[in-house]
Amino acid sequence: MSRLIYADNAATTQMDIAAFEAMKPFLTNEYGNASQPYAFSRKPKKALQDARETIASCIGAAPEEVFFTSGGTESDNWAIKGSALLNAHKRATVTSAFEHHAVLQPCHALERSGYPVAYMWPSREGYITAEILKEYITSQTYLTSVMFANNEIGTIQPIKELCAVAHENGSLFHTDAVQAVGHIPVDVHDLGVDMLSASAHKFNGPKGVGFLYIRSGLKVMPYSDGGAQEFGLRAGTENVAGIVGMAVALKNNCDALEDNTRYVARLESRLVSLLESTDIKYVRNGGANRLPGLLSLSFPGADGEAILHRLDLTGICISTGSACNSKNTEVSHVLQSIRLDDDYAKGTVRISLGKSNTEEDVEAILKALMKIFRA
Ligand code: PLP
């Protein structure tokens, strides 16, 4: 078997070893329940407090605005359903047609309960602009939810501007920042968002843990009813080890943000210039403001799934669309939303490079593509 080349960092990332080391004591000796008052629970309790402070400082929030969850899906569900049910007068949500299913499905659930949802179409370049939002938002909109960065094509949305439009129209603003946090600068107060979702495994933390930022003073329904954990809004014994790992991973990524971005952007340019030097016919999807390292490439007339499997045989992991979509042979809703021709959409793959990739990885990917296209 050839050496593994992991180029699917938008699906998940390799765990930061320091995060793993920080988690270990809470999986072994320090197993006390953080809610108990005795001395043995002091360390886990303190670890939770410290993690909340660390995460808050990484996104410009106050610690009491950070609520630990089981990941991006839960955070999105909580933000969308938890704010809808508290609004007796306004019932409408505005979101985009190219959100992750973790946003689209709770929106569909709201629709089944009689709450109308409008789905904005992005521009062909993959952006929801302030002008687009103005066409959809009404005085009945209580929540606007637009993802920070798209997980299939990587386009970064103008969140600050969108948030301002939402607020001018009396709507709350939520952003699914699962692909952004830990990869590009995110400051909740500068952006003005009311809620923001994040997931640890996308920024080199453990799987099954994430957080929802909820602006201080904003009322949302509890995600779960039971114990008093998470300020009484999300009952259930805390995943102390996971939360500790998430905080270390986020801090490390945020501390090295500029270096990581520069490094990954260099790998990305190398791959693009190598591709350009061949006669392989392709287009790159999404406009210029994109996540570093994420390339959505469409090879007209080709089959994205076949490319994925051919690369897999040489030990290269890439994706045809979002991870959660990879069993679905239909054209992804994201590519449909940017009106990509079917011929291109079916031949689309996502290569997402990360800080653990190397120039050799990029060269191996190019070589494998050249074999497929015999360029
Ligand atoms: N939102 C986006 C944009 C994502 O890319 C993902 C994961 O692929 C999720 C939400 C779901 O996050 P999690 O895997 O932590 O549930």
Image (cartoon, rainbow, N blue to C red):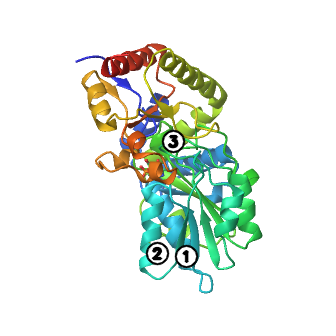
Query: Badge 2 local density, few (<14 within 10 Å), some, or many (20+)?
Result: many
Amino acid type at circle 1 is Ala
- Give above or below for 79 relative to 263: below
CB atoms of marks 1 and 3 within 8 Å: no
Quadrant of image for the N terminus: top left
The crowding category of the residue bearing disc 3, from other C-alpha atoms within 10 Å (few below 14, some 14 to 19, many at least 20), is many
N-terminal of the pair, mark 1 or mark 3, is 1
Figure quadrant of residue 33: bottom left
- Disc 1 versus disc 2: distance between alpha carbons? 8 Å
Closer to the camera, 19 or 293?
Answer: 293
Instruction: Pick the residue in front: 118 or 340.
Output: 340
| Quadrant the C terminus occupies | top left
Q: Position of residue 190 (x, y in %)?
A: 76, 51
Q: Tell me the amino acid under the disc marked 3.
A: Ile
**Percent x, y of residue 24:** 40, 37
Q: CA distance from mark 1 to mark 3?
A: 29 Å
Circle 1 residue? 84
**In the displayed structure, does residue 172 sit left or right of residue 365?**
right
Q: Secondary structure at mark 3?
A: loop
Q: Earlier in the sequence, mark 1 or mark 2?
A: 1
Question: Which numbered mark, 3 or 2, is in the foreground of this view?
Answer: 3
- Residue 191 shows in the view: yes
Q: Mark 3 and mark 2: span between their CA atoms?
A: 27 Å
Q: Do residues under tags 1 and 2 come within 8 Å of each other at their CB atoms?
A: yes
| In the rendered image, the vertical position of residue 112 relative to residue 43, given as above or below | below
- Residue for badge 3: 153
| Residue type marked 2 | Leu
Report helix, strand or loop for mark 1.
helix
* Residue identifier under label 2: 110
Q: Quadrant of residue 140?
A: bottom right
